Structure formats: C-alpha cells, structure tokens
Image (cartoon, rainbow, N blue to C red):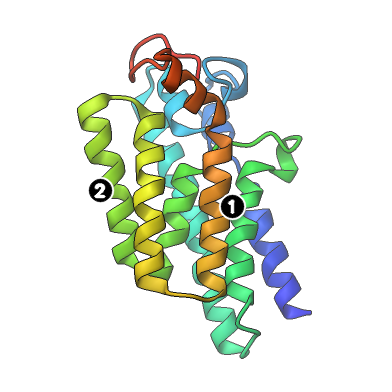
Amino acid sequence: MLTALVVLGAYLIGSLSFASIVSKAFGLPDPRTYGSGNPGATNVARTGNKRAAALTLVGDAAKGFVAVAAAMYVAKRFALHEDAVPLALLAVFLGHLFPLYYQFRGGKGVATALGVLLPLDWRVALIAAAAWAIVFVVTRISSLSALIAIVVTTFASIYFFGPGTTLWSLLSMLALLIWRHKDNIEKLFKGAESGFGKSNQG
C-alpha cells in the first residue's frame, strides 16, 4: 500500500508543469500554444524571457529530484520493496509527459530526467549534463544535444547501475525520451531542425 502511495505521489509531483506555472506567473502565453508547442524550458526561452526559461528548467529538474529522493528515503525508512524507487522514477517522468493537471499534454522530459538521475548517482547526472552542454555549445540544437545525451546516459547507466530494476526503469525512461523526440529526429534527418534562437518549430 505504501509503495503504491509513493508511486502515486511521484506521478502527481511529475504532473506539475513548470513551463505552464512559470509562464502564468510571468504573464507569458501558454507554452503549448506557440513555437514547438512543447511545455519546456527551450520553448519558454522563445519568448525572450531568460529568467522564466531558467526557472522552468530548474523546476522541472527539481521535481524529478524531489520525487526520487523522497521515494528513496521512504523506501529505506519503511523497508519497502526494492521496486519502489524504480517505479517512482518512472512515475514522476510519466507525470511530466502526461500531466494530470494539464489534460495529459506534457513536455519531452529532458530536465526531469536529469533531476531523476541526481539522487540515484550524481556521476551519471553529471555525465548526462556534460554531454548535453558540449553538443549544445557546438551545434546550438537542443534536440540533438538531448539525443546525444540520451545515448551517453544509456551507456553510463549500464556501467554504474548494472543489471537490476533501477537500470531497466532508467532504460525505459530513456526510451520514452527518444520517443518524445521522434519529430525532432525526423527533422534532423531532413536537415530541417534549426538551432537555438532561430526559427524552429520542432
């Protein structure tokens, strides 16, 4: 019963769309109505409000961190089944993708995935963030940066976590990340994906 509550709590935390929350607080339009239509930091940045974009990024990452860190604490405190934390990490991520409070229209999950990684193993989180940053500095293409980071994170997760339910949950999360970027992948192959700050609808 407690495991189910932990998983449900993680999903509800994940359902907090900080792109929408921050945009409303700053008097900006709903991020689902312009640009790529994706409620995430990159799309919020298209408004030109860097502070709102930064807060969106931090908020989406923080909810992943809080949900998993809380699940780890409760699992240890009450000796829950070993699947509690892996299920919670998937739940918070699915909450971001399909938020209960926003008609199940969520973001792609890059920042939330990073937040999920932090309490599990900071080394994997650092590797993921570094891979994204390096590719972004060179290409200025957010989607390509995310996809390269996903590949790098997959191998890092296999190395640091080894076989087990945590690894399988992470691999499922990374697979969902790739799926959420399917339109971007198509544009990349067509050479139609533009860099950050340019006219990009992906």
Write down the quadrant of residue 86 in the picture. Answer: bottom right
User: Is any atom of residue 95 visible in this view?
Assistant: yes
Category of crowding for the residue at label 1, using alpha-carbon neighbours closer than 10 angstroms: few (below 14), some (14–19), many (at least 20): many
Position in image of residue 185 (x %, y %): 48, 27
Disc 2 from disc 1: Cα separation: 21 Å
Judging by the rendered image, the residue that carries numbered circle 2 is: 130
Residue 67 visible, this orientation: no
Residue type at the position of mark 2: Ala
69 vs 193, nearest the viewer = 193
Mark 2: give few (<14), some (14-19) or many (20+) Cα within 10 Å: some
* Picture coordinates of residue 181, whole percent (x, y): 52, 33
Residue at (73, 38) in percent of width and height: 104
Q: Secondary structure at mark 1?
A: helix
| Secondary structure category for the residue under label 2 | helix
Callouts 2 and 1 close, C-beta under 8 Å: no
Residue 31 pos. (x, y %) = 56, 23
Checking the image for residue 93, the label placed there is 1
Percent x, y for residue 29? 57, 18
Horizontal side of residue 140 vs 142, given as left or right: left
- Residue 107 lies, with reference to residue 3, above or below; the image says above
Name the residue furthest front. Answer: 189
Q: In the image, what residue occupies the spot 73% across and 41% down?
A: 101
Which quadrant of the figure contains the N terminus?
Answer: bottom right
Q: Residue at x 64, y 50 (%)?
A: 94
The answer to whether residue 198 is above or below residue 69 is above
Lower sequence index among marks 2 and 1: 1
Q: For this view, does 160 lie left or right of residue 96? A: left
Where residue 107 is drawn, which disc sits there?
none
Q: Nearer the viewer, residue 46 or 110?
A: 110
The residue lying furthest to the top in this view is 199
Which residue type does callout 1 highlight? Phe
